Amino acid sequence: MRVLITGIKGFTGRYLVAELTQAGHECLAFDADLTDAAATDMEVQKLQPEAIVHLAAISFIPNSTGSSVYATNVIGTENLLQAAERLAAPPARIILASTSHVYGQNAHPKETDCPDPFNHYGISKYAMEQLAKTYQDRLSIVVARPFTYTGRGQAAHYLLPKLVQHFRAKSPVIELGNVGLSRDFSDVRWIAKAYHALLTQPLVHRVYNLCSGQSVSFQAVLQHLVQISQHQPKIVTNPAFVRQQDVLLQQGDNARISQLTTAMPLAPIAIYDTLSWMLSE
C-alpha cells in the first residue's frame, strides 16, 4: 500500500517509516507546505496515495501559541483532507494524529469522555478532530490520541530525552520543572506499531487512545535512571520550567487499541525498558 506520511522526517515519522517498510508498504514523503492549499493539493494529486497518516503538527507546548499553531494543526489538516477528497480514488484510510491533551485535566480519560483542552495545542487538535467530522461521510478517517511517548532521537527539549542526556553526561545538577507528576508513557516503537494497526486492521471506532493504560511518576523515572546509570545528580526545581496548568496525573484507557492485538500483537513496551534503550544509545 502506498502510504503518504506528513511529518515523515520528524521523530515519530522515522519510526513509522521503518515499521511500514518492514511490512512491505511504500512510504511517500509529503514535501509541500500544509498551510498552502494549492501546494498541498498539487502534492497529493502527484503522489496519489492509497492511505494517509497525518503526523505533521506544532506539538511542543511552549511553541503552541498564537496563530501559527492553528494555521498548521487546523487549517493544514483542512487543506490535506480537501486534497484527499479530490483524489479519483479516495484513500482507504486516513489517520489523524491528535493528542491526549484534548482531555485537559481528566486523570483517567476514555475515548467516550468529553474533551476539555486548556492549552493552544490541545484546543487546536480538538478543533482538528471536529473539522474531520465534516468529511466523515466521504473519507475513512480515524483519530489517534497518543499520550506521552519517547525514544531515541526525540528532541532534548522534551523531558525524558533531557533527563537521559543529563544522566549520560553525568551532569552534577539537573534543573527541572514540576517533578511531582505521573504520566502514561509509551515507547515510540510501540506507537509506530499502533499506527500500523490502525492503518491496516478492521476498526469499529473512530477515535483510539494510544497509551499503555498505566501511569508512572517522574520520581520513579528518576530513580530508574539513577539505578541504571550509577549516577546521582542533584535535582533542582527551576520555576521557569514549571507550567501553571500542568496535569498532575494522567492514565489513559487503552481498551480500544488493545482489541487490535488479536490480529497484530501490540504489547506495550515498559517505560523502564525504553529509558534503558535510550541511555545505551
Image (cartoon, rainbow, N blue to C red):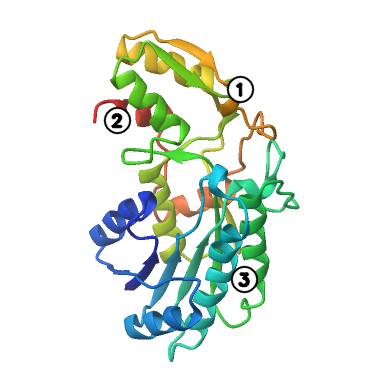
Q: Looking at the image, is mark 1 or mark 2 earlier in the sequence?
A: 1
Q: Say the numbered circle drawn on residue 239.
A: 1
Q: Mark 3 belongs to which amino acid?
A: Ala
- The reply to whether dot 3 and dot 1 touch (C-beta < 8 Å) is no
Residue 210 visible from this viewpoint: no
Q: Is residue 87 above or below residue 215?
A: below
Give percent across and percent down for residue 234.
Answer: 45, 9
Q: Please tell me whether mark 1 or mark 2 is closer to you in this view.
A: 1
Give percent across and percent down for residue 29.
Answer: 31, 68
Q: Which residue is mark 3?
A: 132
Cα separation, mark 3 vs mark 2, equals: 36 Å
Cα separation, mark 1 vs mark 2, equals: 30 Å
Q: Quadrant of the N terminus?
A: bottom left
Cα separation, mark 3 vs mark 1, equals: 38 Å
What residue sits 61% from the left and 22% below the top? Answer: 239
Q: Which residue is mark 2?
A: 277
